[in-house]
Amino acid sequence: MSSAGRWQWLRPALIGFRDALMLPAWVVGLGLVGVGSLARDVGYPVEVAVLSTLLVWAGPSQVLFFASIAAGAAWSAIALAIGFASLRFLPMTIALLPLLRRPGQGVGMQILLSHYVAVTAWTEALRRLPALPPEQRPSYFLGFANALILVSALCTYAGYYLAGAVPIPIAAGLLALSPIFFMTSLTVGVRGFGDGLAIFLGLALSPVASWAIGGGFDLLAAGLVGGTIAFAVQRWRRRAMAGAKAGT
């Protein structure tokens, strides 16, 4: 293999890194400023706060981790709670991996790609990857996601030393940036009636699921039920339109 062939993966990775730095990485990073502050409040060093961003890579789970430590919870209970809180990533990973697979790709690479699945990385990947050649998608995704993690780690570090200096309303607003960006990206990525209906039903069913289920499973249940209904309606519409065309 030529030298150019060995390094052909670098260009899409750099493009992904650049695209993330245009805005998404900063939205995610600013949302993790509070994680650094929380780690300092519970008495953990800045290295642990940054390491939690690099390894856990999920703001709500990191907040749950440090808050549980502050409450004196047992380590087994903390691990179980974080595991349940991260269940939402399973269907997201299942939906995204078909876009990232390519011939000859090993299980180790797929596990590595799965580690980077998070809310912003997932929504932006679903929106951006279909336009790329299949062989460039893993490199682009890794470049994009690593930019998110790098900026998030830097913001976690900054938040550790800004603890107490950021007013509570601003800190709360920063935490809300990520879900707002998630909803915006999800709406922009709508490609048909079924997608729009799934988003609408997910939002509509969330309060009901929170009241009826709660415990971290409400969003999973609302998404599963809403997505299933939207999928069934979309299939029915396609069959009806195909039948109408056949009858003309």
Image (tube, helix red, strand yellow):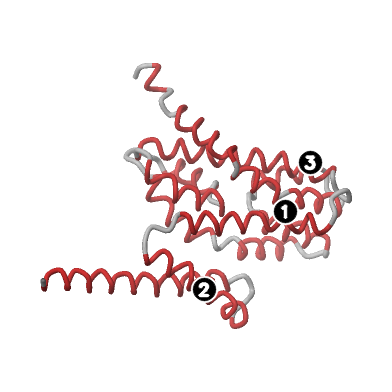
For the N terminus, the quadrant is top left
**Residue at disc 1, secondary structure:** helix
Q: Is residue 220 above or below residue 29?
A: below
**Disc 1 target residue:** 174
Q: Quadrant of the C terminus?
A: bottom left
- Within the image, what quadrant is residue 232 found in? bottom left
CA neighbours of label 2 inside 10 A, class few (<14), some (14 to 19), many (20+): many
User: Most extreme residue toward the bottom, as rendered?
Assistant: 212
* Labels 3, 1: front one: 1
Q: Which residue is mark 3?
A: 158
Q: Residue at x 29, y 70 (%)?
A: 235
Q: Which mark is residue 220?
A: none
Q: Gap in Å between the C-alphas at discs 2 and 3?
A: 36 Å
The kind of residue tagged 2 is Ala
Q: Is residue 4 left or right of residue 220?
A: left
Residue designated by label 2 = 221
> In the rendered structure, which amino acid carries the disc numbered 1?
Leu
Q: Is residue 95 left or right of residue 22?
A: left
Name which of mark 2 and mark 3 comes first in the sequence.
Answer: 3
> Residue at image x 17%, y 73%?
244
**Is 130 or 42 nearer to us in this picture?**
130
Q: Eyeballing the image, is 42 above or below 153?
A: below
x and y, in percent, of residue 60 in the image: 67, 59
Q: Residues within 10 Å of mark 3 (few under 14, many from 20)?
A: some
Q: Earlier in the sequence, mark 3 or mark 1?
A: 3
Residues at marks 1 and 2, CA–CA distance in whole angstroms? 27 Å
* Image: 219 above or below 172: below
- What residue lies at 65% left-to-right and 43% top-to-bottom? 26
- Based on the displayed image, in which of its 4 quarters is residue 88 positioned? bottom right
